[in-house]
Image (cartoon, rainbow, N blue to C red):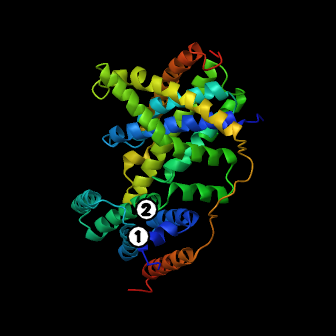
Amino acid sequence: MKTFSPIQLLLRVNPLLKIAFTLLALTLAFAIKTLAGMAVLVGFLLLLLILGGRVVPWIWLVGGGVLLLITGVNFYFTQDLTYALLTASRIVAILLPAPLLASTTAPEDLIRALQTIRLPAYVVLGVILVWRFLPLIQEEANRIREANLLRGVDLGWEPQKLFSGLFVPLVFRMVTYADEVTIGLETRGYDPLAPRSSAVPLGWRKEDWGFIGLVGLLLTGILGWETGLIT
Amino acid sequence: MHSWQLKDYVFAAFMSIGTLLAAVITQGFALMIPLPGARAILWAPFAGVFLTLAMARLRHVGAVFLVITPVGLLLGLINPIIPIVLISAAAITEGVMTLRKGYGGSFNRFLGNVVFFEGTILLSMLAAVTGLTQALGLTPRAINLPLWLAVPAIGIGALMGSLAWWLGEQVVRQLVKAGKLDEDL
């Protein structure tokens, strides 16, 4: 039996919808003029972040501390508590949407979304290869660093050797990888311009309607406070 | 218009990985510098190595776009302004390099690097300053003077672009020596 999980709900929302919401939230963060309207937006974003359940406690502590500091400094210079709070919450509203999108979107979902909106083939292939090979290249960089340590070179303490000790050998490995991957793709008949199929096509689900409903409520709330209809 | 092959796309994607790694490496240092555009300034010399390499191997106009677009899209997950800055700088670079008919030759790669990093640094500074002033509701006189910020930014951009090109050319030479790249010095 399926059980309701808010984390699953956010993960299942269409990535394109989440990208659109990120842009909308950023625009609202700059446009909102009232503290109450900003509080509604920040509250909504924090709620989504909690539902997403991907934030470690120390980030809350550091984030909270920095915001208190910004509010305090602003209040000290302006002697206007409303302005100080509005500024601090505006910064939260600007900073939250992108990590929220990143933490609740699986890489494969993002790639399927990019394919759906028919981005140029090179962009989709580029993103796929970057996601697939970034961890491998990072591992390769670690191996090179360890090899340097064996020779008595600690790159952490000798940054002047970073270029010759790490970058040059890493570039050589990357060029070799690129050639091998090209051969692998060509022998398998991969064509970047051919349409790609997906076992789980990206469609419109009921979670997307739910998310749109929530955003609709958010917009109504903000509009109400901004226009003075809600006091 | 040059038609790209699969090997070009794959090579560009690997250079994108390099530029992303450069962003990861320099991120920690950049956070300690409270200057608008600091990230782009520190990122430039490291990312330039991979960008120069892509220019040397792909040679045709569009090479910078092939490398930068996936990077911009992925970094857009961290900050939606980043793809706008990167793709705009890439568009300016490709526009200028169309007049030079591509990236063949050391001087063209130098020009490509300088234009790209000049564009990236100036645009990221502009985005950071605009964002901060809008977010904080500030209109201080110093920030209203674009020259106050633009002149040093242009200097730093040229310096970082040149450094990126110089480092990149060192790697290009070694790859040519190793027989992994066609000679084009």
Q: Is residue A79 left or right of residue B25?
A: left
Q: Residues within 10 Å of mark 2 (few under 14, many from 20)?
A: many
Question: Residue at left 70%, top 37%?
Answer: A186
Above-or-below relation of A10 to A173? below
For residue A48, which numbered disc appears in the image? 1
Where does the image place residue A105, in percent across and percent down from the top left? 49, 60
Q: Is residue B99 left or right of residue B79?
A: right
Rounded to the nearest angstrom, the CA distance separating label 2 from label 1 is 8 Å
Chain letter of the residue carrying label 2 = A
In the rendered image, which residue does mark 2 sit on?
A100
Residues marked 2 and 1 touching at CB (< 8 Å): yes
- Say which mark, if any, is on residue A198: none
Residue furthest toward the top? B177
In the rendered image, the quadrant that contains the C terminus of chain A is bottom left
* Amino acid type of the residue tagged 2 in the rendering: Leu
The chain under label 1 reads A
Identified by mark 1, the residue type is Leu
Task: Judge whether B138 appears above or below B50 on screen.
Answer: below
Q: Of A162 and B128, which appears nearest the observer?
A: A162
Query: Which element is circle 1 on?
Result: helix
Residue A184: percent from left, percent from top: 64, 36
Within the image, what quadrant is residue A151 found in?
A: top left
